[in-house]
Amino acid sequence: MLSRVAESLFWMSRYLERAEDVARIIAVNFQASLDAPSASQELAWEPLIAITGDRGLFNAAFQAYDAESVTAFLTMHPENPNAIRSCIGRARENARAVREQISREMWEQLNRLYHTIATTDVEVITRDPYSFFSEIRNGSHLFQGVTDATMAHSEGWEFIQAGKFLERADKTARILDVKYSALAGHSGGEGAPLASLQWIALLKSCSAFEPYRRSHSQLQAWRVVDFLLLDRTFPRSVGFCLDQTRSALVRISDSPLDRPANTAERLLGRLCADLTYLDIREALADLHVYLDDMQHKLNGVGDAIAQSYFVVNVLPPGTTPLSRYVQAQQQQQ
């Protein structure tokens, strides 16, 4: 498979997963703000910007952290590369670049989703956020289902899986980092009514509330962290996502699981082993530091995948490998 094809499939999947994750956290926040109307707008909406890591861009464009400003920034602000419209647009462009490698049904579904958000404005979203964000989430789920049903499960499909699960692991870690830090400092304690609502919102932000309640009868901080980090049966836990990413890369390289073929597989193997033998009490001692380190390692995995599979080894005169890699990253970011 050509490196440009693999890169486009990988980023198509990552961008679509990113759009779905952003849509979910905004929808959950709208619902949480209705359940806890006494909370200030800034305290309710500022964490969403922290999750995406775009605080500087937001402050340059908006004055206050309120529902309308944050929704506008995260859905369709032209300067925000992580906005839903931007992510779906980039996913569509990557799909267009490899149109001959994906099925007609995949292209039609992604194109339909793109035109849905292209014809929507912020006022419509804020009047009926549930309908809009449900359409984004359902559209992403439909695309994943169509992909599994209509595309050969060969190398191209494996790159799609690797992109999806790597992005999902990163978002779950980010959501847990930001939300847990805010909840840990809550004066009412984890059993207080407002804190309980926020724990529920945290789980719902990862589509984890119902799976969690089937496993645990109480909302306890350490159990929530344990579930979102280590549960190998929940498809949005960090552990599950990293296992799936590692499996996809192993199938691509056709190497034994215990003999990694490249740096990306080695980094993923270390991360998976670290989670397997993690004592959750040690992580909770300073969860922010642990999750921040994990996010850096996930970024390292993404860089290693690019270096192993996407960066062209035959370079034009005067081009160094580093400059070629930086150029490729800038084109996707």
Image: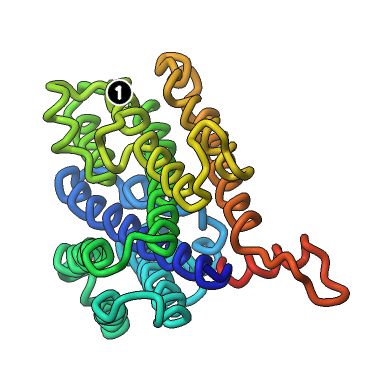
Q: What residue type is labelled 1?
A: Ala
What residue would you read off at disc 1? Answer: 221
At 22% from the left edge and 39% from the top edge, which residue is drawn? 208
At 55% from the left edge and 30% from the top edge, which residue is drawn? 270
Height in image: 116 above or below 218?
Answer: below
Other residues around mark 1 within 10 Å, as few (<14) / some (14–19) / many (≥20): some
Which of these two is toward me, 213 or 105?
A: 105
Relative placement, left or right, of 218 versus 182 is left
Relative placement, left or right, of 197 versus 269 is left
Which of these two is toward me, 198 or 319?
A: 319
Height in image: 254 above or below 113?
Answer: above
Quadrant assignment for the C terminus: bottom right
Please say whether residue 77 is visible from this viewpoint: no
Task: Name the spot of residue 180 as percent of width and height, x first.
Answer: 38, 32
Task: Name the spot of residue 213 as percent of width and height, x first.
Answer: 14, 30
At 49% from the left edge and 48% from the top edge, which residue is drawn? 254
Tell which residue pokes out farthest to the right in this image: 318
Marker count (numbered)? 1
Q: Which color scheme did the rendering employ for the protein?
A: rainbow
Height in image: 291 above or below 261?
Answer: above
Height in image: 110 above or below 264?
Answer: below
The secondary structure type at the circle numbered 1 is helix
Please say whether residue 19 is visible from this viewpoint: yes
At 60% from the left edge and 43% from the top edge, which residue is drawn? 261
Task: Name the spot of residue 246 as percent of width and height, x first.
Answer: 46, 42
Relative placement, left or right, of 255 versus 132 is right
The image quarter in which residue 199 lies:
top left
Task: Name the spot of residue 39 as percent of width and height, x first.
Answer: 26, 43
The image quarter in which residue 103 lies:
bottom left
